[in-house]
Image (cartoon, rainbow, N blue to C red):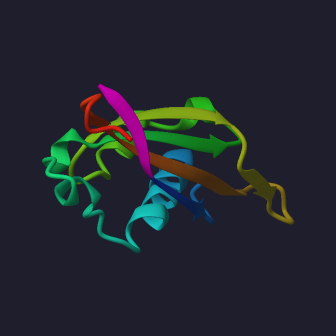
Amino acid sequence: MARKRMVVEMGMGTDLQGQDYTKAAVRAVKDALWHNSLTIAPAFGFDKELMQIEVSIGVAQPDKVDKDAVIAVFPYGQATVEVVEGGLDIPSDCGTKTTVIANAAAVVYLDFAEEDAA
């Protein structure tokens, strides 16, 4: 099989008050995906469940992201999530709260038979 990159989507999400890295990550993925409808798989004769989706999330504290919650955002396809150090934390003036900013990139792949690959 020849795996081909079909789509790259990027998004940003925040949690303004709750300091919840998972919430910010989920919002970043939704920002990347909710502005389109991926019809690429059916256009090539594939079931949407065969889409392979690799998600990269950047947040200041990667260990605080629930990867399963991020995967649950996807209505179809086979998603994997990698969380890396990135994003941004913005402390409040009083120093008791932090605004969390997450960045997300979702890359969608399809596997084509070698004879179909160009």
Indicate the quadrant containing the C terminus: top left, top right, bottom left or bottom right.
top left
| In the foreground, 115 or 4 | 115
Q: Is residue 33 magenta?
A: no
Q: Relative to residue 10, is residue 118 drawn left or right?
A: left
Q: Residue at x 66, y 44 (%)?
A: 59
**Can residue 19 be seen at all in this image of the molecule?**
no
Q: How far across and how far down the image is residue 38, in percent? A: 30, 63
Q: Which portion, as a residue range, is magenta?
A: 1-6
Seen as rendered, the residue at the extreme top is 1
| In the foreground, 95 or 44 | 44
Q: Residue at x 40, y 39 (%)?
A: 4
Location of residue 94 with respect to 2 vertically, above or below? below
Q: How far across and how far down the image is residue 97, in percent? A: 72, 57
Q: Residue at x 27, y 36 (%)?
A: 112
Labels in figure, total: 0
| In the foreground, 86 or 78 | 78
Q: Main secondary structure of the magenta part?
A: strand
Q: How far across and how far down the image is residue 55, in percent? A: 47, 41
Seen as rendered, the residue at the extreme bottom is 35
